[in-house]
């Protein structure tokens, strides 16, 4: 079976200057020869502390920043201009701050319909029908399409953002710290929504988080990242129950209900 996502020898750097615009150009490596694969319909977790390069990896997969190496999504090579539009349909993202992702001047229905208009998909009636379908998928009724961002709770905003990502029927969703800006109860609802969407639509997902409990609960396999390198990969049970890398063990020790602390681990249903 062909992989949904294949990342080979991926490296990326940021460029800064020592004295502003006129200073010496300094290249700062962020990612170092990353290799990973995601199978169709798999939820893959990427976990590590802030600044380790997780978000940079997600941006590379989305084609938002330059990199060296190879990224293939559903048979299409990232970076090829001929595949750019089709690539955008196959991979979409949900980001950390839903308030920053929604235009406050537009109603939710207009925001949800925009990807269809840009890609010239369907007529007005067909697009509005798709908006209603997606609102139902993310747990909102059709009346929400008439609301603006300030009329929505943070959890409802994130559901709209997830809906936007679903409009083009992608094969892969990149969720970058998608519940870290939410309170615990709302975050749990969004986490369960991801599980439902995965089950009902067969979505593949790259779930990026600093929280090992969340990654264990949601994901089939996990990669642990430190300083731009993947230090360990394996099934969720292997990583959580029998970590091999010292850094993974340190992450688990920092989690209040990690194994060995006397508290129960999160349950995978």
Image (cartoon, rainbow, N blue to C red):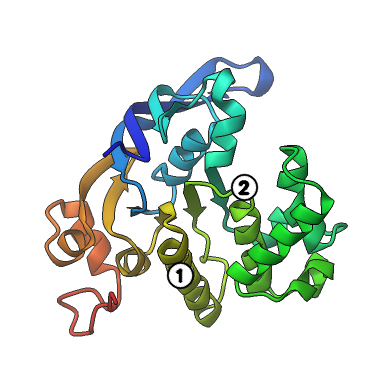
Cα–Cα gap, marks 2 and 1: 18 Å
Indicate the position of residue 108 as horizontal and vertical percent values. 78, 62
- Where residue 160 sits, quadrant-wise, is bottom right
User: SS of the residue at dot 2?
Assistant: loop
> Is residue 97 visible to the viewer in this orientation of the structure?
no
> Is residue 62 visible to the viewer in this orientation of the structure?
yes
Of the 4 image quadrants, the one containing the N terminus is top left
User: Can you say whether 58 is above or below 33 in the image?
Assistant: below
Please state if 113 lies on the left or on the right of 176 as rendered. right
Residue drawn 22% across and 44% down? 231
Indicate the position of residue 155 as horizontal and vertical percent values. 63, 73
Please state if 192 lies on the left or on the right of 264 as rendered. right
Q: Residues within 10 Å of mark 1 (few under 14, many from 20)?
A: some
Between residue 261 and residue 113, name the one nearer to us. Answer: 113
Among numbered discs 2 and 1, the one appearing first in the sequence: 2
The residue that label 2 is drawn on is 168
Whether label 2 touches label 1, CB < 8 Å: no
Residue drawn 32% across and 38% down? 3
Please state if 38 lies on the left or on the right of 15 as rendered. left
Q: What numbered label is drawn on residue 186?
A: none
User: SS of the residue at dot 1?
Assistant: helix
- Residue pushed farthest right? 105
Indicate the position of residue 53 as horizontal and vertical percent values. 41, 42
Q: Residues within 10 Å of mark 2 (few under 14, many from 20)?
A: some
Residue drawn 67% across and 72% down? 156
Indicate the position of residue 51 as horizontal and vertical percent values. 44, 46
Q: What numbered label is drawn on residue 196?
A: 1
- Where residue 249 sits, quadrant-wise, is bottom left
């Amino acid at each position: 079976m062909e992989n949904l996502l294949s990342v080979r020898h991926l490296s990326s750097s940021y460029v800064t200057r020592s004295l502003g615009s006129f200073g010496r150009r300094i290249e700062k490596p962020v990612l170092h020869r990353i290799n990973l694969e995601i199978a169709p319909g798999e939820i893959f977790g990427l976990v590590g502390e802030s600044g380790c390069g997780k978000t940079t990896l997600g941006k590379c997969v989305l084609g938002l920043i330059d990199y060296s190496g190879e990224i293939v999504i559903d048979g299409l090579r990232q970076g090829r201009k001929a595949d750019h539009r089709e690539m955008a349909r196959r991979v979409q993202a949900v980001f950390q701050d839903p308030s920053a992702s929604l235009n406050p001047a537009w109603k939710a229905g207009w925001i949800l319909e925009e990807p269809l208009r840009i890609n010239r998909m369907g007529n007005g009636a067909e697009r509005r029908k798709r908006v209603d379908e997606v609102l139902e998928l993310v747990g909102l009724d059709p009346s929400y399409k008439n609301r603006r961002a300030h009329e929505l709770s943070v959890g409802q905003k994130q559901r709209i953002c997830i809906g936007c990502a679903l409009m083009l029927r992608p094969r892969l969703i990149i969720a970058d710290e998608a519940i870290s800006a939410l309170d615990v109860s709302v975050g749990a609802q969004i986490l369960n929504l991801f599980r439902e969407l995965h089950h009902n639509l067969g979505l593949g997902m790259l779930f990026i988080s600093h929280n090992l409990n969340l990654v264990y609960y949601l994901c089939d396999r996990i990669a642990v990242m430190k300083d731009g390198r993947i230090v360990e990969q394996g099934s969720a049970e292997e990583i959580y129950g029998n970590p091999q890398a010292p850094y993974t063990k340190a992450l688990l020790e920092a989690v209040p209900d990690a194994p060995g602390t006397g508290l129960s681990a999160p349950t995978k249903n």
